[in-house]
Image (cartoon, rainbow, N blue to C red):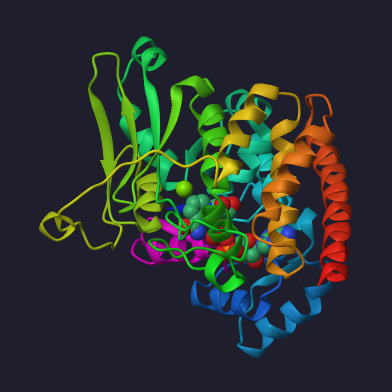
Amino acid sequence: MQNVAILGATGSIGKSTLGVLELYPDKFRLYAVTAHSRVKELAEIAKRFNVSLAVTSDPSKLEALKEALAAIGCNARAEAGAEAVARLAASPEVDIVVGAIVGAAGIVSTFRAAEAGKKLLLANKESVVCGGKLLMDTVKRCGATLMPVDSEHNAIFQCLVGETERSREKARIILTASGGPFRTRKDLSDVTIEEATHHPNWSMGRKITVDSATLMNKGLEVIEARWLFDFPPERIAVVVHTQSIIHAMVEYEDGVVIAQMGAPDMKNTIAYSLAYPDRFTAGVTPLKFSQIKTLTFEDPDLNRFPQLGYAYEALKMGGSASIVLNAANEIGVEAFLEGRIGFTDIAVLCRSMMYGFQPPAPTTLEEILETDRQARELARAWADGYSEHRRDKN
Ligand code: NAD
Ligand code: MG
């Protein structure tokens, strides 16, 4: 029996994880869950899985969480604050940490789980983007096991199993992208919040759904792949594959390409990460090839979706460029979802931040967090100025 903690249990990945854990009550015990603001929902999960600890990362929600737990007769202990989440990630009670927090808010707990040598199922791609080599070195040094819970990276992991070091060094990663909802739309300047928060193939949280629409998500995934698999950016390509059946491919020196396929359902990825090196059912309906019929491929359009290109530029620039890009994007998406800037302004913000703010490469977790904090502050000021300008113009 292994004890599991889900950080971000109320989110899309959190819920998919609950769906898989439910199938294996004899293998895994859900020990603790966290959420930011939806404490009622958190309490319901705590009760349903009989967990020992429920944590809200928002310190002002502690009383509300206690009340919600008491109201449904759940006697899980309640804690609050980002430090409580970080403590949980390193808790000796926990064997497996599921990192399903959205955004850079997940960085600290990812590092804590790595430092504590946990098995870490990592969906929080922003912590790989910001943590980079430092995170991967920490995982290695502390004997942690990192399983990528991003469908593409989980697929790459599967395509690389059993290959020699030499064969990997000659291989090329091919990430697939659905192309998002605006793949064929010419003018993106008037995209609405409603349109940008509906993905054609995947059901996900709001931030990653907007990232998929700008292709920033694929850009973050290029950076993520660079660090997770230690592949240089020249050997990481992106192809648009609208059906989202192939999650990623690896092309080897002999020209053979290994592709990983499955229904677009994160339960597949989570189940593989829990079962590895074994496999067990994920509770997902298998593919029916006679219904899929065609698989299509095309190049991404970097003119209409420049943020994918910025990710490659950030890797080339090195230093803290990926942290700055990530922070600018998070603030940009937030401002877009609040109706303060337009859809295409997110890319403008990312670009001006990447070229306007170039701190040196971080050497510690504290430096990563400080760069992220400074970048957010600058990006916020930019977004505020921009939205004021838009208001005056209208
Ligand atoms: P979501 O918005 O549905 O859920 C986010 C979770 O994080 C919630 O439980 C929320 O309470 C918590 N949270 C939000 N702000 C927080 C904060 N400041 N501090 C601590 N916790 C906070 O997001 P999601 O779609 O589940 O995505 C989670 C992560 O997984 C993201 O990094 C995303 O890129 C990655 N991911 C998601 C999918 C998917 O299918 N949803 C696929 C691949 C990767
Ligand atoms: Mg993905």
- Residue 336 is situated, as x and y percent measured from the top left of the image, at 70, 63
Q: Image point 40% across, 56% down: which residue?
A: 266
- Nearer to us in this view, 16 or 84: 16
Q: Is residue 88 magenta?
A: no
State whether residue 4 appears in this view: no
Q: Residue furthest top?
A: 166
Q: Image point 26% across, 46% down: which residue?
A: 296
Residues shaded magenta: 10-31
- Residue 281 is situated, as x and y percent measured from the top left of the image, at 26, 56
- Residue 177 is situated, as x and y percent measured from the top left of the image, at 42, 46
- Residue 115 is situated, as x and y percent measured from the top left of the image, at 67, 34
Q: Image point 36% across, 19% down: which residue?
A: 171
Q: Is residue 29 magenta?
A: yes
55 left or right, relative to 220: right
On screen, 186 above or below 92?
A: below
- Nearer to us in this view, 282 or 90: 282
On screen, 244 above or below 45?
A: above
- Nearer to us in this view, 303 or 29: 303
200 left or right, relative to 336: left
Q: Which image quarter is the C terminus in?
A: bottom right
Q: Image point 38% across, 34% down: which residue?
A: 156
Q: Residue furthest left?
A: 290
Quarter of image, ligand 1: bottom right
